[in-house]
Image (cartoon, grey):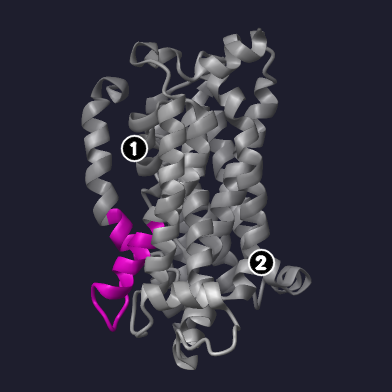
Amino acid sequence: MVDQSIAGAGTMATASDGDRSGRARIVILALCLGLAVAVLLSMTSGASDASAVSVARDWLLGAAPGNEAMSARDRLIVYDIRLPRVTLGVLIGAALAVSGAVMQGLFRNPLADPGLIGVSAGASLGAVSVIVLGATVLAPITSMLGTLALPLAAFCGGLATTLVLYQVATRRGQTSVATMLLAGIALAALAMALTGILIFMADDRQLRDLTFWQLGSLAGATWQKIGSVGPVIVLALAAMPFLARGLNALALGEATAGHLGIPVQRLKYTAIVGVSAAVGASVAVSGGIGFVGIVVPHLLRLAIGPDNRYLLPASALLGACLLLLADAVARTIVAPAELPIGIVTAIAGAPFFLWILLRKRGVIDL
């Protein structure tokens, strides 16, 4: 009986719309197909002459004798340069979108987003600290941790920001939306100020890297980078679907969720750690990519409802699709140069966020 109550908690608010589980399954299947198309499009977008057909033939034929679907040059570009970039884009897009969905469920408000409320800024501060101070003040730590130093620093920065934000915004089990937004802005401003001090201390080489990195980019993706942050993102993504039933129950309020048998405090801390790990690892290798975490869950919530059992996997798929498409646009719109992907997501996401604010004015009025 308790399980049935928890499973239905996420859809009670939209009971008049009927059961959306069938539609959700269709949408998830369509997103799986869409992700395959997005991967193929991203693999074939750019200076290489390799077409989608030739890449698909090469995938199917592999090392079969007489396989000349692609030249050696195109195969090098596709598999050694673009494939790591596509893999990283899928991981980061899924991580940011699912993190946004989890935070919206945790705060019970569709305006919550890791970038909007300062989590990404905190993760950026941790990553910039390692980039600028890794060879001096933090040299003992970076030498001991090696390639794990950057994602761990970003994770710690995101975790610290999230914990502070939750403590400030939550009183007597209730989260104030206005306090959450204002505290997030303040924490983001503080993190950005400290990041600015570190940038001021950086040398010319570090400064050029940081300037481009802060705008967000998948350029420079390598299998080594994926090996350092991929396991963290995959573990976080694998753990978050287990929070779905608890987040559904949390939509009814913390007291009700507790009566339904949900360990509310453990749920909250697990969600916070998972989001911090996913966002921190993503920021460590891609820089700041905004609006994915707020746009994707909101679009899906309109389409399939708020049931997190379907919302979380659908967010992972749509987030990966959108980030790959944004990366393809960033690589081709000003070719042969490359536009930072954070600019593309901001141009597309900012108007959508303003639309959400207009629809939710009654929620955020002070």
Q: Nearer the viewer, residue 277 or 37?
A: 37
From the viewer's perspective, is the residue at label 2 or at label 1 nearer? Answer: 1
- Looking at the rendering, the stretch of residues picked out in magenta corresponds to 323-346
Q: Secondary structure at mark 2?
A: helix
Q: Secondary structure at mark 1?
A: helix
- The residue wearing badge 2 is 228
Q: Residue at x 70, y 27 (%)?
A: 266
Residue 146 on image: x %, y %: 72, 72
Q: Residue at x 54, y 30 (%)?
A: 309
**Label 1 neighbourhood size at 10 Å, few (<14), some (14-19), many (20+)?**
some
**Label 2 neighbourhood size at 10 Å, few (<14), some (14-19), many (20+)?**
some
Q: On the rendered structure, is 96 left or right of 226?
A: left
Residue 176 on image: x %, y %: 43, 22
- Quarter of the image where one finds residue 211: bottom left
Q: Where 348 falls versus 66 (above or below)?
A: above
**Is 334 covered by the magenta stretch?**
yes
Q: Quadrant of the C terminus?
A: top left
Q: Nearer the viewer, residue 140 or 339?
A: 339
Q: On the rendered structure, is 343 left or right of 229?
A: left
- The residue wearing badge 1 is 299
Tell which residue pokes out farthest to the right in this image. Answer: 144
**Is 118 covered by the magenta stretch?**
no
Numbered label tally? 2
Q: Quadrant of the N terminus?
A: top right
Residue 205 on image: x %, y %: 47, 84
Residue type pointed to by label 1: Leu
Q: Earlier in the sequence, mark 2 or mark 1?
A: 2
